[in-house]
Image: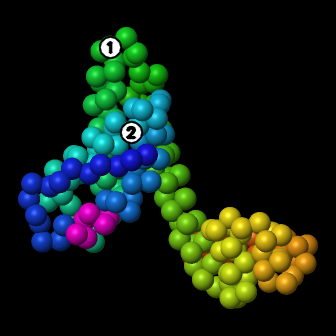
Amino acid sequence: MPITMPQSPLSLPDSDEFDLLLSSHQGRLYGFIRSLVGTDRDCDELLQRTNERIIRQQADFELGTNFVAWAFQIAKNQVRHYRRQSSKDSHGVPFDEATFEVIAEEAEQIDESSEQRRRALSVCLAGLPDKSMDIVQRRYFKNESVQGIADELAMNPNAVSQLLFRVRQRLMSCIENNTRPTEIA
């Protein structure tokens, strides 16, 4: 999914930070928009329109506030406009405005839950012992085979598989502990 971000006609003092926010949330914006429209092609077009609108409205955003919520609102408005246009042509729209609102709200909640789990995973990965982290990086980030890892570390492939199994179990438990709502006493 190639992203082309139009250049802002005004260079605001904190535009580098804003550009970083926008570029780092492209995946989340794409996922949100995709949950609201029927095809990848429509999603790509709407993501482009959303990026353009976000850049035009850059001055309206206050750094330190929730960028994702702000950007999702702009995306939702772009999808609404698209739905109104689509209802005029022969394609129609698959659901009414009330259903659209429910789907958009669910998509926002799912995105927030996923983001919480991603943050928890980062924390949990940072807590792994060096050897475990090395093996996880080799297997899941560099796509090395279990056999290749075992050969390079002079380990039995079954031992590598067992270590990866235990690490996955530890990470799942850690993520659950870090995303569980805290109880108020």
Quadrant housing residue 48: top left
Q: Give the class, few, some or many, for how many residues have Cα within 10 Å of label 1's Cα (few <14, many ≥20).
A: few
Amino acid type of the residue that numbered disc 1 sits on in the rendered structure: Asp
> As rendered, which of 99 and 148 lies closer to the eye?
148
Q: Quadrant of the C terminus?
A: bottom right
Residue 75: image location, x then y, percent: 32, 44
Residue 64: image location, x then y, percent: 27, 72
Q: Is residue 183 visible?
A: no
Amino acid type of the residue that numbered disc 2 sits on in the rendered structure: Asp
The image shows residue 167, relative to residue 22, as above or below, that is below
Please name the residue shown 30% across and 15% down the image. 88
Residue 92: image location, x then y, percent: 39, 16
Quadrant housing residue 161: bottom right
Q: Which residue is mark 2?
A: 44
Please name the residue shown 21% across and 61% down the image. 61
The image shows residue 89, relative to residue 135, as above or below, that is above
Q: Are marks 2 and 1 in contact (CB under 8 Å)?
A: no
Viewer-nearest of discs 2 and 1: 2
> As rendered, which of 142 and 96 lies closer to the eye?
142
Q: CA distance from mark 2 to mark 1?
A: 20 Å
Q: Is residue 16 left or right of residue 178?
A: left
Tag 2's secondary structure? helix
The tally of labels here is 2
**For the magenta stretch, what is the residue range?**
16-21
Q: Give the class, few, some or many, for how many residues have Cα within 10 Å of label 2's Cα (few <14, many ≥20).
A: some
Tag 1's secondary structure? loop
Residue 78: image location, x then y, percent: 29, 38
Q: Is residue 18 magenta?
A: yes
Quadrant housing residue 24: bottom left
Please give the label number shown on residue 108.
none
Q: Which residue is mark 1?
A: 89
